[in-house]
Amino acid sequence: MRIEDAKLVNLSRRSVKLRRIALAIIVALIIMQLAGCGDKEPRRYSTSFLGAFDTAITLIGYSDSQRDFDKYAELAEDRFLELHQIFDRYNAYEGVNNIYTLNHSGSERPVKVSADLIDMLEQSVIWQKESAGAVNIALGSVLEIWHDYRAEALADPSSARIPDREVLEAAAEHTSIDDLIIDKDAGTVYLADPDLKLDLGAVAKGYATEIVTRELREAGWDSFIISSGGNVRTTAAPPVGERKTWNIGIQDPEAALEGLDDELLFTLQLIEKSVVTSGDYQRYYLYEGRRYHHIVDPSTLEPASTFASVTVVTEDSGLADFLSTTLFIMPYEEGLAYIQLLGDVEAAWVFTDGTIEMTDGLRDMIIDREG
């Protein structure tokens, strides 16, 4: 071997050694970065979107990065919009058989619908029968009348009026839940009464919120809340900071009527719970000094008039939504007895005169506003 060749060999070996050292340094840096990512505290992110269930839906949660949060937020928004279309009774959508479809052609033949709609209808029927029909998802023909009168009054307050009793009673002849025929195996729904109309307003938003919560968790997200109008679903506690609960404020119904949405009755500390409030201040119109809101009692065919608001706390958001309307319609003593039978349900009733009653369990969840 010539001297020149030996030098080249030595240089080659030295280059390989340097490359190996450089590679080792790069690998070490990558490992350090990955370790740093594991130790990095999650940050709090939030976003809101419109277009689903006629309300602003807000998502707040903790993620390792904006990219991760955006992934979950996109999943949530897409799913809420999809469920809105499925549960919508006022609009048709191309390629979607929804409540609107059933109300317009469900009596002609069984209609093929999504599993989400089948499941929701079945669960709503169970809840309805357990509560002796305080909320009836087949009351759509009556609710439609009140909806039209409310829309007319809001468009022109001088034209405000209330429906004739005879009109309401005629519509009530077509509100039997037994005329809703669900065939889960076939995936179809049939309305045995051509004048029956379904309305899922008492449960759809909460039910959708529970579905989205479950699917976000299945996607790997653990600590977040969803606020959809008067419905809030909390999950695991915030993973950083001293606070180990989500603090949820409950509106003062009287203040809300005056547009003071930030005025609170109290604040609740919650983990893994849903809280839903139904109130007479949310959708209403005035006629001869009386407020006619959207929560109609099937027994009177008129807006319920005992409470200004009812708040329910339980785990499942769909059940909480259903129960808040149910308790708003039921007499107080009857409603209290009902949720005591259910178990794991807490509630607060605000009467129209401002009196407040609540379960002991809900009282234990209350903190000072400064807390």
Image: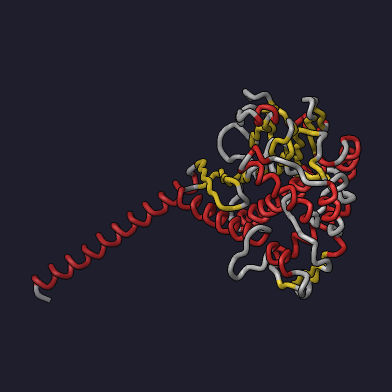
Q: Which of 118 and 91 is in front in this view?
A: 91
Q: Does residue 83 appear anywhere in the picture?
A: no
- Residue occupying the point 33% across, 56% down: 26
Q: How many labels does the image show?
A: 0
Q: Does residue 55 appear anywhere in the picture?
A: yes
In the rendered view, tell whether residue 79 sits above or below residue 3: above
In the rendered view, tell whether residue 224 sits above or below residue 188: above
Residue 197 locus on image (x, y percent): 77, 60
Task: Specify the quadrant that holds the N terminus.
Answer: bottom left
Q: Which of 52 and 211 is in front in this view?
A: 52
- Residue occupying the point 80% across, 30% down: 351
Residue 105 locus on image (x, y percent): 72, 70
In the rendered view, tell whether residue 238 sits above or below residue 109: above
Q: In which quarter of the image is residue 278?
A: top right
Q: How is the image coloured?
A: secondary structure
Q: Quadrant of residue 359?
A: top right
